[in-house]
Each structure stands twice: as C-alpha cells, then as structure tokens.
Amino acid sequence: MIDYKTTVTDLNAQLEASQVELAALRQKILEAEILQAANLALTQSLDLDAILETFLDLLYQVIPFDSATIMLLEDGARLVARAVRGYEKWCDPALARAVSFNFTTTPSVNEVVSQQTSFIIPDTRQYPYWVKVPSSEHVCNWLAVPLVVNGRTIGIYSLDKAEPSFFTETHRHLAEALAIQAAMAIQNARFYESELAARQKAETQANQLDALNRMAQAVTSVLDLKTILDIAAAEIVELLDARSCGVALLNPDRTLLEVVAYATLGNEPSAVGLVIPLAENIATQQVIENRQTIVLADAQNTPLQNDATREIMRTRNTQCILLMPLLMRGEVIGTIGPDTDQVGRVFTQEEVRLAETIGSQIAGAIDNARLFREAREASEAAELARAAAEAANESKSAFLANVSHELRTPLTSILGFTRIVQKRLEERIFPQLQAGDPKTQRAATQVEENLGIILTEGQRLTTLINNVLDLEKIEAGKMDWSLEPLALAEVIAQATAATASLFEQKGLSLVEELPAGLPQVSGDRDKLVQVVINLISNAVKFTDQGMVRVRAQVADGEIRVSVTDQGIGIAEADQPLVFEKFKQVGDTLTDKPKGTGLGLPICKEIVEHHGGRIWVESALGQGSTFAFTLPIDNLRRTDD
C-alpha cells in the first residue's frame, strides 16, 4: 500500500531544496552580472576620483548603505579618506573627508588591513573597541573590506548603517567580490597618476634646463651690463611664471637702490628709474647685508618695509615679491625682485633656488662686463682686445640666432669662441698691456679668470644637456646600439686609462682584480665604457684618501663588475634615490652638487638594455660598492 502522506512530504522537501538551489543559482547569476557591470564601469576611466565615485555608485546599487568611505594607504601605515558618500544627513561631509589615522591604532581596522579580511560589527554600541569620531556618531552597523592587489593592501572601504545588524554574510561576500574589481582599477589609476606626475616633472625640469641654457647663451654673448640685466629679468619672469621682475643697483654710497632693468608678462608700466631707499626697509637691508633671499608673501602689508615702499606695492598691485641679492665677486651690488599680482601666490623654495641659480649664473657675466670696460679704459692696447671680442661676439650672436632652438650646438659654439678670445688675449693683447700698471694687470688677470669660469660652466651645462638628451633617447628607444662580442677586461682597461688623471689629482690608488679568461659578452663597447667611467669617477669624487677597487667575477651565468671606494658612504634611506633622475644625496641648487644627477640613471638604462642589473651596497662612513651584471652570451674564454 502506498503511503501518500510520506510521498507528499518527500516531494515537498525536494521542492523546497530545489527552490533553495534555484535561489542560490539566481544569486550567483546576479552576482556575476553585478561583477561584470562593475568591471565594465570601473575600467572606463583612469581618473582616480572618477573611479572612486563610480565604485560608490555601484556599491549603493547592491548594498544600500547609509554612508560609506573609501580610504587609501599612504606612507605605509596611514589611511586617508579619498571618497565619501551619504554623510550629509548626519554631519558636514568635510568631516568625513578629513579623516586620516594610523590603522594600527584601531583593532578592527588593523585586522582588515593586516589580515586582509573583511570585518563586520553588528552593533557598534556593543563593540568595546569602536572609536567614535565626529563623522561616525550615527553608525550602528559597520562593514569594512580590504582593497588588495597582488597580495598587498592598498586601502579599505567601509559601509555604514544607522540600524544594527543590517549587513549579512551575503552582503559581505558581495562586498569582497566588488573589492577585487575596485582594487585593481584604483591601483591602475594610481599608477597612471604617478606616471603623469613624473612626466610633468620631467617636462618642468626640461623647461628649466632650457631656460638656464638660454640664459647661459645670452649672458655670455654680450658684454653690456644693461643688456645682461634685461635678459636676466626676462628669463626670471618666464622661469618663475612671475608677473614682472626688476633689477636694481646700489648707488656708490650704498644708501639707495635704483631699478635699471625690468621685464613683465603684462602691460604694467616699467619700473625703470624707481628709487628705493634702504633706510627703514628692513627686508631690503637684510638681503644686502646678509646676502640672503627673502620672500615677502604679503608685500602690501609687510612690517619689514616702510610706508612708502608698501604704498608702491599697493599702487602696482604687488601681492608677493622675492628679494634676492645680486652679487659680483662676492659683493652685493644690487637686488633682483620678481613679483606676482595673484592673491595667495607665494614663491616656493624650489623657485627660490632656481632664481638664485640664475643670479649666480649672471654674476660672472656682470663681473666680466665690468672688468672688460675697466681694461679697455686702462690701456690703449686694450682697444684691439675690444675689437677682437666684438668680432667674436658678433659671429657668435649670429650663429646663436640661427640655432636658438637647439641645445648642444650653441653651447659648443660658446665654448669654442671663448677659447679663441682667451687665446687672442694671451697671445696678442696681454703682452701689449702696460707692464707697470697694477690696475691693468689686475683687470687682465680677472678677465682671464672669468673666461675660465665661462668655460667650466659651459662644459658643465654641455654635460648636463648631453646627459638629458642621452637619457631621453634611451627611454624613447631612439638610441643607436652597436652590439658585438667583446671582452669586459678591455672595456675596464679603457675606462681606467680614461680616469687615470683623476687618481693622480687626488693621490688615490687603483686596485684591479680581474681574473684571467673572463667570458665574452655581447654589448656596445662605448656605452659600457661610459658606465665603468662613470662608476670610477664617482668613486674618486667621493673618496679623499685610500683606494678604489675595480673587480670582475663570474657567477650564475653572469659577469659581475663592481667598483668599491673608501669614501663617505650613502645612508640606507638615500640608496634607492641614487638611480633616480636628478637625485643626489643632499643636493640642492645652491649647494653646488658634484654632478648632474643623471650619470647613474643613464648607467642603469645602459645596463638594463644589455639584460643586466645595477645596484649599490653602502653604509655611512664605510664607503660604497656600485656593481652591475651582464649575461654571458659566449662561453669561449677570451684567451682561447
């Protein structure tokens, strides 16, 4: 006999199980559709703010929160709010956007970040470790999910409800799935932001180098003081994006400043002829007496200037002014003053350093112009020198006018003509000067010294520009490479021969440890020589006594070349910076860094192009070892 009651019960149970399975299947399909939609929406942009706002929109569609916050990790342990939603009902959203804290100080958040696991507080009123902040007074139920990319936590996001126990395990699961999509989109956007910032920084640095190069070309091509100051004012306005710039010279008794050169981007009336007394103008006095640059952020109301000067600032609508000493042979002869008319615009420390670099650049040109005039007036024989200099100057000016948009060629011309002037002065002019006139001889010596300064600085700029262009070529994939089988021992020998004079100048010894029969590698001889020369030169540069060791050895299918010095060493925190462009340990524009900050980045690019790697091992006071490796392409020994 059939037990219909039991059969119906079984059927009902099977039906309920099927319905549960169907509901679960529908939930999975819904989640898949949500994740697909999220992936599509989050990959439409690389703008970080737009991605965060899109993510909050997606979250609200599937998990109806009352408020939400997305926080990203900065400086290792600090979480910073980058996007918020829904706080308007309870507080000023600015309070939520201002949240920033060390995640290790909050147990729940620390677990989310460190353990990379989501965390639900069903009722914050019952949770003993809940930390209340002004923007979280309304929160009863809290769900936090980590944002993880490649095993690394980059931030978290939290969802809030004003009622307890709202968020379920289904919400948690969905939130975790969405976090995977969002974390990758956020990381891509941050990479893009970083790349964009690096590109903008490189463009800014290139523009600055171009401006400095134009300045070098301009001030070394003229011998007229007024022209030099006009050029300086115009270049400073462009370089600092200033409203205008005035150059003032001290009167003989050093009580007044008179503006003698002026440049502006707008239609402001010229300030040439404006006289500023030093009395009661404390800021101006400090600039001249202490040889220090001062930035007056509120030029119209500063107590460091007198009423008359403040009134001039108001009349000209000057909001901020940078006062910088103008030096000649170590003596202040005037001031340089770029200014702005934008409220809140204040010159930065980087802009101050750039302005001071230009000031030091034109100091030699000013000195040379004055000394040349003194030498011409002191001796009739100097007339020939003046004519020769003017002829050279005209030829150089004509040449520079034709290639004003180039970089290396104008500098080459400047250096060449400077050597010609130096040779003609030494061979034809100086011998004809009055031998018994100390003033004439002193002026001639100073002219000769200043020509040496021009040559030294021109060569330094040429090296800097060549390095910048070489690095750009390498990064753009436009560098020509001549790869051939070669012996590294020959490369090292060529590099040590090229740097031998450096060791002689400093009294250092060179120790070479090159085993016989090093394998050949495939490489560009000239560029690998450049790498070794750079490493040896740096070692000599930072070593005052002792020795420099160059070593080569074979290991794991590579040749390892190292250069070890007994110099000052590099702090561990600074070591990651040495291979970055324009980075030097402790370098500033005013401290005269020992190089361009591009040699090691270029070495890195060359070595990596050859399939190798380069690194530094160092400690303060214990010297440094710079090493690189190259893969062995040919196992035949060089002595076979």
Image (tube, grey):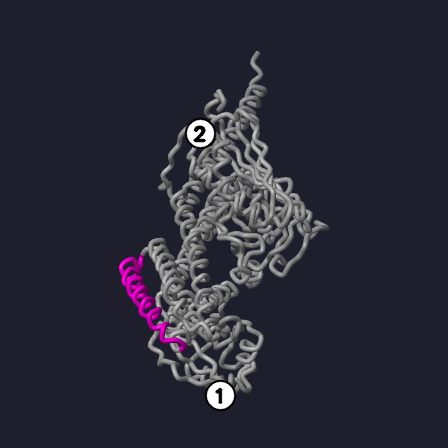
Disc 1 packing (10 Å; few <14; some 14–19; many ≥20): few
Residue 616 percent across, percent down from the top left? 58, 41
Give the quarter of the figure containing the N terminus.
Answer: top right
Q: Which residue is mark 1?
A: 308
Q: Is residue 320 magenta?
A: no
Q: Secondary structure at mark 1?
A: helix
Q: Nearer the viewer, residue 326 or 168?
A: 326
What is the residue that sits farthest to the front in this orientation? 436
Write down the region rendered in magenta: 378-405
What residue is shown at x 62% (from left), y 54% (from top)?
139
Looking at the rendered structure, the kind of residue marked 2 is Leu
Is 49 drawn above or below residue 114 in the view shown? below
Looking at the rendered structure, the kind of residue marked 1 is Ala
The answer for how far apart the CA atoms under marks 1 and 2 are is 74 Å
What is the residue that sits farthest to the right in this orientation? 128
Left or right of 27 on screen, residue 622: right
Q: Is residue 383 magenta?
A: yes
Q: Which residue is mark 2?
A: 486
Disc 2 packing (10 Å; few <14; some 14–19; many ≥20): some
Is 255 drawn above or below residue 152 in the view shown? below
Is 461 drawn above or below residue 449 in the view shown? above
Tag of residue 92: none
Residue 127 percent across, percent down from the top left? 70, 49
Magenta stretch: helix, strand or loop mostly: helix
Q: Is residue 121 visible?
A: no
**Image depth: mark 1 or mark 2 in front:** 2
Using the rendered view, name the quadrant where residue 119 is placed: top right
What is the residue that sits farthest to the top in this orientation? 1
Residue 338 percent across, percent down from the top left? 44, 73
Q: Secondary structure at mark 2?
A: strand
Using the rendered view, name the quadrant where residue 448 is placed: bottom left
